[in-house]
Image (spheres, rainbow, N blue to C red):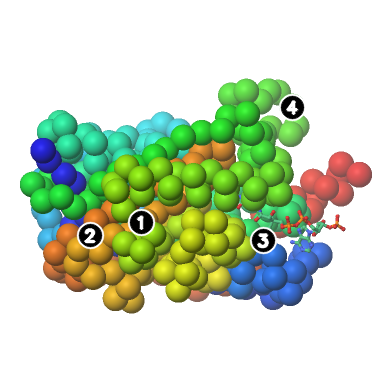
Amino acid sequence: MFHAEITGWGKCVPPAVLSNQDLTTFMDTTDEWITSRTGIKERRICHCNFSDMAIVAAKQALAAADLDPKELDLILLGSLTNDSLCPNTASLVQDAIGATNAASLDINSACTGFLYGLHIGTNLIKTGAHKKVLVLGGEFISHYMNWTNRDVAVLFGDACGAVVIEQTDQEVGLLAAKIGCEADAKYAIQITNLGSAYSRFTEDFLYVDWNFEGQEVFKRAIRCMAQACADVLEETGLTVDDIKLVVPHQANKRILDALAKRVGLPPEKVFINVHKYGNTSAGTIPVALTEALEEDRVAPGDYVLIATFGAGLTWGAGLIRWGDRVKPLQVSTAELPPTDKTALEIIQPQIDKYKDRNQFSL
Ligand code: UT7
């Protein structure tokens, strides 16, 4: 029986910081409202392409594993904000890192894209079909933001994370996962005016906007993640006392507090970085996992629980047993191209575009 050990991990967070205070300069909101309702204090804004972030995260993960990219046989990239529909972004990553022997596939299950990819990659390794897989999750969500929609614009940020998983005989890696989808609520999070279901002959086309039923998502997120956590614990015969750390999807601190309570976990076992980055969708878990390792929150042999939900409404949980190594073997010097722009300067043309549009529509 094969398993799939996580041997490398890495992240890329763009340097431009958009604070709650920055948002109040062009939107009817307050730091107090955002902090008390979500726990978010700031988020990052990407100044380049999504693939640039994915490539940096991939190089960090490969260095941590000290793996020659030519040994990778599969790249799975979870995202809904890929550089283009065609070619897919996993191909761009493959080319940039020199993973010439890897099949390359984008996965779009929104915020759950990393866990979906980890589950698929792990099971392909378990069957023997693949041996060394790069799994990425990330988002350039600010690209799709309507900055005049305060219900949504305060919640999200940009980032990407990655892990390398490799075949092993040891019982480590993703030991169990439960993934699913409550498609009756598929329109509770919806990005509109982009995609082939929208008429390209109307003025609205490409004025991307969001339908967002926050409270509906909030309730379902807690219920689905709690049930999925219970399922993977039952499948592995473990209890919450065996769990060293939970690394959940970082959408809202209140959701994380409620999840911990529902699952019966003390708050100190829950890794939280939502205050720094907001919701980076498919990026939250690989970025948080990388930071948990950087902060020595994971020791060899620890059980780590991950839980997530997102548009679809897709959901899932996974139970990871960490291997022998919690330190990177190498560190990559890869980084994003520099920018001298502030986050506000990067998004200003987009703010103007939507403000003009709203004026025109009135
Ligand atoms: O990864 C999946 C992505 N989705 C999620 O994570 C969404 C999960 N849901 C949530 O996190 C929460 O439901 C939100 C943070 C989105 C909203 O929190 P809430 O406590 O459910 O607020 P609410 O929707 O009940 O809104 C309360 C009020 C409304 O005003 P009225 O109608 O009560 O006068 C909103 O208009 O807050 C108002 N509001 C704002 N006020 C200031 C909404 N957005 C803002 C804002 N600043 N940015």
Q: CA distance from mark 1 to mark 2?
A: 16 Å
Residue nearest the viewer, comparing 195 with 111:
111
Residue 197: x %, y % from top left: 62, 23
Image marks 1 and 3: residues in contact by CB distance under 8 Å: no
Q: Which mark is residue 202?
A: 4
Q: Residues within 10 Å of mark 3 (few under 14, many from 20)?
A: many
Q: Which residue is mark 2?
A: 322
- Report if residue 109 is visible in the image: yes
Q: Which mark is residue 110?
A: none
- Distance from disc 1 to disc 3, alpha carbons, whole Å, reads 36 Å
For mark 1, what is the residue? Answer: 239
Which is more N-terminal, label 2 or label 4?
A: 4
User: Mark 1 or mark 4, which has the lower sequence index?
Assistant: 4
How packed mark 1 is, by other alpha carbons closer than 10 Å (few <14, some 14-19, many 20 or more), is few
In the image, what residue type sits under mark 3?
A: Val
- Which residue is at 11% across, 38% downward? 1
Q: Earlier in the sequence, mark 3 or mark 4?
A: 3
Q: Is residue 353 visible?
A: no
- Say which residue label 3 marks: 154
Nearest-to-viewer mark from 1 and 3: 1
Give the amino acid at mark 1: Thr
Q: For residue 131, which quarter of the picture? A: top left
The kind of residue on which mark 4 rests is Thr
Q: What's the residue type where badge 2 is placed?
A: Trp
- 92 or 124, which lies in front? 124
